[in-house]
Image (cartoon, rainbow, N blue to C red):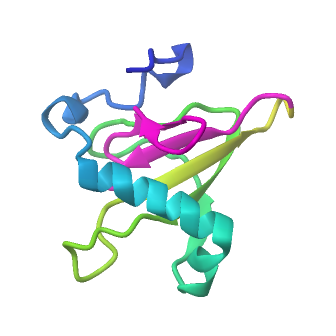
Amino acid sequence: MVPAAPDDTKLDPAGLNASNPLTLQQQEAIVDTFNDLETGDYVASGRPMKIFYNFPSYATGAQLPKDYTYVEFRVLDLSMDGPGAWRLVIGVSTIDDSLPFRIYFTNTHYNSFYRVILYPGGGTGS
């Protein structure tokens, strides 16, 4: 488990992640999405990528750290017929170009977020 950064306190103010932990299927889907982005298959598949405006969730108040510009990507949930609730949100600092990307996953359609850490050789952590 990676400790929360000081500005990650609003990722899950309602405590949804405690009762809705990441599944192996979700972790694999996150990795698959990164692989699709790297190979160009994400764009070729027609899945959208769009600006994520980072407003607080009306239901829970969840919000990503400020001072980043975010882009969201759909993560395929093969148990759903439509797009489902899973999203990968990647942020770039707006104040310091030397800061690393911030990567988040939501399985509650923006009502809570997990911070995603990529490890060398593949895989994710939360």
Q: Is residue 11 left or right of residue 98?
A: left
Residue at point 26% right, 48% down? 24
Residue 102, magenta (yes or no): yes
> Is residue 18 a member of the stretch shown in magenta?
no
Compared across the picture, whether 94 is left or right of 63 comes to: right
Q: Is residue 113 above or below residue 25?
A: above
**Closest to the observer, 58 or 46:** 46
Residue pictured at 66% horizontal, 64% vertical: 38
Which segment did they paint magenta? 98-126
Residue ranking furthest to the right:
97
x and y, in percent, of residue 18 in the image:
18, 29
Q: Residue at x 42, y 27 (%)?
A: 10
- The relative height of residue 28 versus residue 20 in the rendered view (above or below) is below
Position of the C terminus, as image quadrant, is top left
Judge whether residue 108 can be spotted in this image: no
| Residue occupying the point 49% across, 24% down | 8
* Observer able to see residue 30: yes
Q: Main secondary structure of the magenta part?
A: loop
